C-alpha cells in the first residue's frame, strides 16, 4: 500500500498533513494543492504526506473500457512528489474491495488511521462508495478529529485546469496549449530501439514508449528530447501503438538502448507516414 520515496519517510504513527487526490499529470491545480499541504505541515511541524491511488478508479469501475493510459505513470508521479518535498507517500490499491468502502470507512481507515490532523483536497474531491462523500461531508466527519482545507477551482481562460482537460488537448493535438494547464510541456519516456544517422546532420531513432503513457493524437510534432541530460530539438511521429519515430537535429552520437524523455512542443500537421517525414526533412522545412 505504501511506497517509500525517500530515506526521510517517517513512521505511519506520526501525525501528518495529508494531500488527497489521484494527481494524474501533477498539473498546476495539483501543485497548488500539494504546496498548500506542505505549508500547513511546516506550520504545524508535522509530516507532509500525500495519498494517491492506483490503478485509476475507471479500471475497476469500468473494466470493459480497457487499460487506462496515464499522463504520469505511478513511477513518474512518485519522482515528482519527491521533488516537491513530500515526506510520506501512501499509494492505496484501488480494487473492488476498496471501491465498496463507505465514506465513513474510508475516513476511519485512511485518514484517522494514518494519524492525519489536516486534510487538503480539491473542491470536487469525492470518496467512498460511488463517490458519495464530498468535501462538505469530510468537514463534518472530521469535527474534533482533523481539519480540512478545500482548494477552489483553478481555471485557464474560464476552463477548469484538470487532467481531463489535458487529455482533451492531447486528443486534439493541441500540445502547445498544455503548459497553461500542466505548468510545462507534456512529457513521455521511452527506450531507443533503433538509431541511424542521416546526412551527417539528422538522426532517426525509433522509441518504444512505456505502455502506461497516453500519447497525443497521431501526427507530426515539434519536440525537445532529453538523452543523458543533453537536449535535442526535432520532430516526432507515432508509427504504431506506443512506438515513435523521432528525427533529431545535431545528434551525432549513437543513442541505441538509451532512455529518452520527449516533450511535445507543437503540432506541425496531422497524421502522416514515414515517407512524408523523410520528404519534409529533404526539403529542409524543419524549423528546429
Image (cartoon, rainbow, N blue to C red):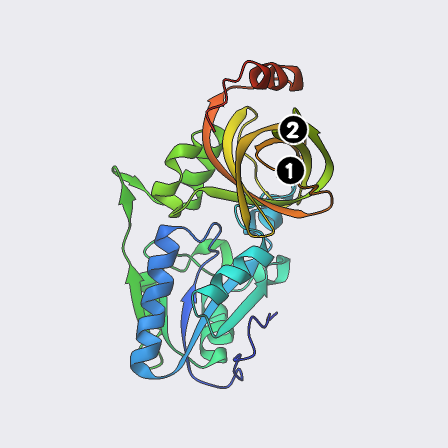
- Is 229 above or below relative to 170? below
Q: Which mark is residue 252?
A: 1
The reply to whether the C-beta atoms of the residues labelled 2 and 1 are less than 8 Å apart is yes
Number of disc labels = 2
Residue 40 visible: yes
Residue 278: x and y in percent read 63, 18
Q: Residue furthest front?
A: 200
- Is 187 above or below relative to 236? below
Which residue bears the numbered disc 2? 200
Q: Quadrant of residue 225?
A: top right
- In front here: 183 or 68? 183
Residue 254: x and y in percent read 70, 41
Label 2 vs 1, first from the N-terminus = 2
Give the SS element for disc 1: loop
Residue 214: x and y in percent read 57, 40
Residue 202: x and y in percent read 61, 29
Q: Residue at x 25, y 38 (%)?
A: 158
Residue 121 visible: no
Q: Residue at x 35, y 66 (%)?
A: 120
- Is 237 above or below relative to 88? above
Q: Residue furthest left?
A: 158
Amino acid at each position: 500500500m505504501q511506497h517509500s520515496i525517500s530515506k526521510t519517510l517517517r513512521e505511519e504513527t506520526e501525525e501528518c498533513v495529508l494531500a488527497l487526490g489521484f494527481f494524474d499529470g501533477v498539473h498546476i491545480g495539483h501543485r497548488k494543492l500539494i504546496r498548500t499541504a506542505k505549508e500547513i505541515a511546516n506550520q504545524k511541524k508535522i509530516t507532509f504526506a500525500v495519498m494517491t491511488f492506483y490503478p485509476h478508479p475507471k479500471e475497476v469501475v469500468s473494466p470493459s473500457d480497457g487499460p487506462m493510459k496515464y499522463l504520469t505513470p505511478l513511477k513518474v508521479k512518485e519522482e515528482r512528489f519527491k521533488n516537491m518535498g513530500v515526506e510520506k507517500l501512501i499509494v492505496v490499491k484501488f480494487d473492488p474491495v476498496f471501491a465498496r468502502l463507505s465514506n465513513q470507512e474510508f475516513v476511519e481507515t485512511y485518514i484517522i488511521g494514518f494519524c492525519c490532523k489536516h486534510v487538503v483536497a480539491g473542491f470536487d474531491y469525492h470518496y467512498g462508495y460511488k463517490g458519495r462523500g464530498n468535501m462538505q461531508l469530510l468537514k463534518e466527519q472530521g469535527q474534533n478529529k482533523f481539519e480540512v482545507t478545500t482548494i477552489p477551482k483553478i481555471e485557464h481562460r474560464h476552463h477548469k485546469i484538470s487532467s481531463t482537460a489535458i487529455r482533451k488537448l492531447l486528443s486534439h493535438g493541441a500540445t502547445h496549449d498544455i503548459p497553461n494547464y500542466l505548468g510545462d510541456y507534456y512529457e513521455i519516456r521511452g527506450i531507443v530501439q533503433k538509431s541511424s544517422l542521416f546526412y551527417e546532420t539528422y538522426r532517426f531513432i525509433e522509441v518504444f514508449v512505456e505502455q502506461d503513457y497516453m500519447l497525443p493524437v497521431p501526427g507530426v510534432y515539434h519536440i525537445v528530447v532529453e538523452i543523458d541530460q543533453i537536449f535535442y530539438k526535432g520532430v516526432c511521429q507515432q508509427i504504431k501503438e506506443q512506438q515513435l519515430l523521432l528525427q533529431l537535429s545535431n545528434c551525432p552520437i549513437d543513442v541505441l538502448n538509451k532512455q529518452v524523455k520527449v516533450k511535445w512542443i507543437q503540432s506541425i500537421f496531422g497524421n502522416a507516414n514515414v515517407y512524408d517525414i523523410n520528404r519534409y526533412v529533404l526539403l529542409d522545412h524543419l524549423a528546429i
